[in-house]
Amino acid sequence: MTDYAIEIQGLVKWYGAVQALYGVDLNVQSGEMFGFLGPNGAGKTTTIRCLLDQIRPQEGTIRVLGVDPQANPTAIQARVGYLPGELHLEENLKVEQLLRYLGELRSNKLDKDYLKQLVERLELDTSRTIKNLSSGNKQKVGVVQALMHQPELLLLDEPTAGLDPLMQQEVYRLLREAQAKGATIFFSSHILSEVEAIAERVAIIREGVIVEEATPSQLTHMSMRKVNIHFIEPVDPAPLAEIEGITLLSQSNGIQAALQVEGDMDALIKTLASFPVKYIETVPHSLEEIFLKYYRGEDKEEN
């Protein structure tokens, strides 16, 4: 019996002459809320589609809920809730008809009270025809159909795309509730504040390669931070920029200085002891800024 809901080893995928995945290794623990980060084209959707056997990799092994999806894709699909990044719905059906049809495909093994609760909490009008819905309301339909059978594993590709902030928060609550009931949630996103808000662990993928795997808080601690220093009287802040890991971003008449700090702040604090400091503001970078740091750093190395 495995403790992992998802196990990926050495996953390689080519689309013709274009390589999308370069040996992805990733394990997601059962019951975990896992964020999969990357920009468009990084390999997020390709990885998820391989998990569902919608496409097949050239190399690598996959286990989903302990099952090889290539050997038994039907068994996987019965236990998984899936929200694709590009959601295609039957345009001429009403929402209620679509949900009823999807329920029939699952042998009507649905908790109707739970389905009603999902519809109400997402403020979804099920009497409307799909083609007349906004993109945000179509996304709500996608969220409902993924959650409504209360699956063991949720594979969600950009789950809050097109939703307003209030609905985003409601989706986050629904995912936390599903996790509390034992579900594993694996979701891809390029909205990094989203992952920062709900993920327990994060993997960052760039051009088909996992470049980092950690908790959001660990990534934040690994990041640079901005430090704003206000002095009692004008000073020359240039010596601060000579400290390893410190970059002077700006200064204002010697009264204020904005620094970028990599690593710990011990050397900076010791140096500041000889300055007439009024107060210090420390602003940790968001996960989004950390993400951009990875990309910019690697781009520089490639140039």
Image (cartoon, helix red, strand yellow):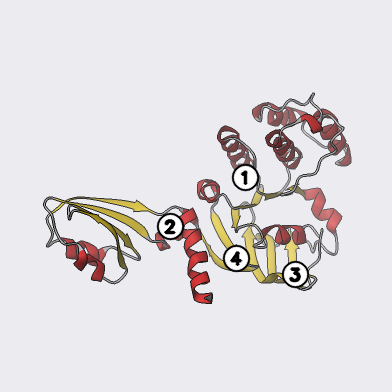
Q: Is residue 281 left or right of residue 284?
A: left
- Camera-near label (2 vs 1) is 2
User: Percent position (x, y) of residue 237?
Assistant: 19, 62
What residue type is disc 3 on? Answer: Lys
Residue 13, which numbered label?
3
What residue type is disc 1 on? Answer: Gln
Q: Is residue 171 left or right of residue 71?
A: left
User: Dot 4 lies on which element?
Assistant: strand
Answer yes or no: is residue 108 visible: no
What residue type is disc 2 on? Answer: Thr
For marks 4 and 1, the one nearer the N-term is: 1
> Residue at the spot x=24%, y=56% of the render?
251
Residue 206, which numbered label?
4
Alpha carbon of mark 4 to alpha carbon of mark 1: how far?
27 Å
- Camera-near label (4 vs 1) is 4
Tags 2 and 1 touching, CB below 8 Å: no
Q: Crowding near pointer 3: few (<14 within 10 Å), some, many (20+)?
A: many
Q: Is residue 233 left or right of residue 33?
A: left
User: Dot 2 lies on which element?
Assistant: helix
> Residue at the spot x=17%, y=55% of the render?
254
Vertical side of 124 occupied by 222: above or below: below
What residue type is disc 4 on? Answer: Arg
Residue 179, which numbered label?
1
Residue occupied by mark 2: 220
